[in-house]
Image (cartoon, rainbow, N blue to C red):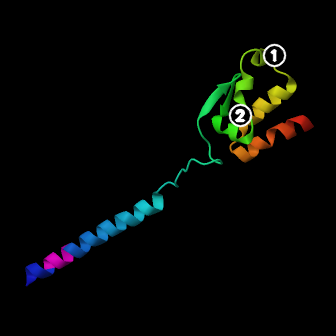
Amino acid sequence: MRYLAAMCIAIFLLFLAFWGGARIMEMVRQPNRLDDDFTVGQRMDLCGYSVDIRNRQAGYDFDLWRGERCDSLSELDECLLRCLSQAGTVKIAGECYPDCVKQ
């Protein structure tokens, strides 16, 4: 009878240890990083600026920023590239052009 009681207590303690470990894992788990339109994606070099490639979804054609345009950037181009390199979301990137035109 003592062995049965000891085995029941051991099983209960083992259950508590696994349950406690699962609770701790749940508390420290990182949030899911879904790849959608509003999260940060891969970055690419665009005329010396590191730009998130998802900004294409905000309407920017990165193929226009190749060759001669990089060699002679206007103030608007500099402002736009600076804004795109700092934009963390597509929504912010979509506002870069109107903000740079205002400046």
Q: Badge 2 local density, few (<14 within 10 Å), some, or many (20+)?
A: many
Image x and y of residue 6, in percent: 14, 77
Q: Provide the residue designation for mark 1.
A: 72
Element under disc 1:
loop
Number of marks drawn: 2
Q: Provide the residue designation for mark 2.
A: 85
Image x and y of residue 84, in percent: 73, 35
Image x and y of residue 33, in percent: 54, 50
Relative to residue 5, is residue 27 drawn left or right? right
Quarter of the image for the N terminus: give it: bottom left
Figure check: 25 above or below 90: below
Image x and y of residue 89, in percent: 69, 45
Residue drawn at the location 81% of the way across and 16% of the way down: 72
Relative to residue 75, is residue 91 drawn left or right? left
Quarter of the image for the C terminus: give it: top right
Element under disc 2:
helix
Q: Which mark is residue 102?
A: none
Q: Badge 1 local density, few (<14 within 10 Å), some, or many (20+)?
A: few
Label 1 to label 2, Cα distance in Å?
Answer: 18 Å
Relative to residue 47, is residue 41 drawn left or right? left
- In magenta, the rendered stretch is 6-10
Quadrant assignment, res 49: top right
Residue drawn at the location 57% of the way across and 47% of the way down: 35
| Residue 103 appears in the rendering | no
Residue kind at label 1, given as amino acid type: Ser
